[in-house]
Amino acid sequence: MACCRGSIDQLRAASAVALTRLLSTPWTDDGSLAVEGLVSAPAGVAYPEEPLQAKSGASSTLVPVTRAHVSVRFAPA
């Protein structure tokens, strides 16, 4: 399987890029929502990045897994 290792790593990297692009599609380049009828609201909580990284163990390291959880709330019409 060593002969295919580069291909697997490239596929994993491509999946991360594809997921990032997919998750960014609801917004335009200027940061406004691109989906008609949806409105944005401030998150309401500002949390500094450094404590968040310390608590989560986050780093700039690439991992061989790509996944996302998307949660959307729709208000009644």
Image (tube, rainbow, N blue to C red):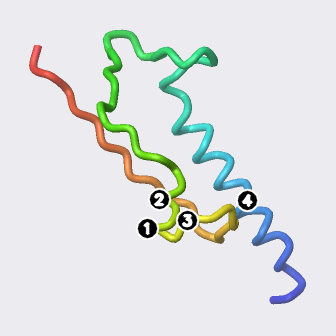
Q: Where in the figure is residue 68, as x and y percent of width and height?
A: 45, 54
- Whether label 3 touches label 1, CB < 8 Å: no
Residue at image mark 4: 13
Dot 3 alpha-carbon crowd within 10 angstroms: few under 14, some 14 to 19, many 20 or more: few
Q: Where in the figure is residue 17, as x and y percent of width and height?
A: 68, 48
Q: Write down the quadrant of residue 63 in the picture.
A: bottom right
Dot 2 alpha-carbon crowd within 10 angstroms: few under 14, some 14 to 19, many 20 or more: few
Taking the spot 86% from the left edge, 88% from the top edge, the residue there is 2
What distance separates the C-alpha of mark 1 from that of mark 2? 6 Å
- Whether label 1 touches label 2, CB < 8 Å: yes
Taking the spot 30% from the left edge, 42% from the top edge, the residue there is 71
User: Nearer the N terminus, badge 4 or badge 3?
Assistant: 4
Taking the spot 33% from the left edge, 15% from the top edge, the residue there is 39
Residue at image mark 1: 55
User: Nearer the N terminus, badge 1 or badge 4?
Assistant: 4
Q: Nearer the viewer, mark 4 or mark 3?
A: 3
What distance separates the C-alpha of mark 4 from that of mark 3? 18 Å
Kind of element beneath mark 2: helix
Residue at image mark 3: 58
In the displayed structure image, the side of residue 12 where residue 1 appears, left or right: right
In the displayed structure image, the side of residue 70 where residue 25 appears, left or right: right
Say which amino acid is labelled 3: Ala
Kind of element beneath mark 4: helix
Say which amino acid is labelled 2: Pro
What is the number of the mark on residue 5?
none
Between residues 38 and 2, which one lies in front from this camera angle?
Answer: 38
Q: Where in the figure is residue 58, as x and y percent of width and height?
A: 55, 65
Q: Nearer the viewer, mark 3 or mark 2?
A: 2
What distance separates the C-alpha of mark 2 from that of mark 4? 28 Å
Residue at image mark 2: 51
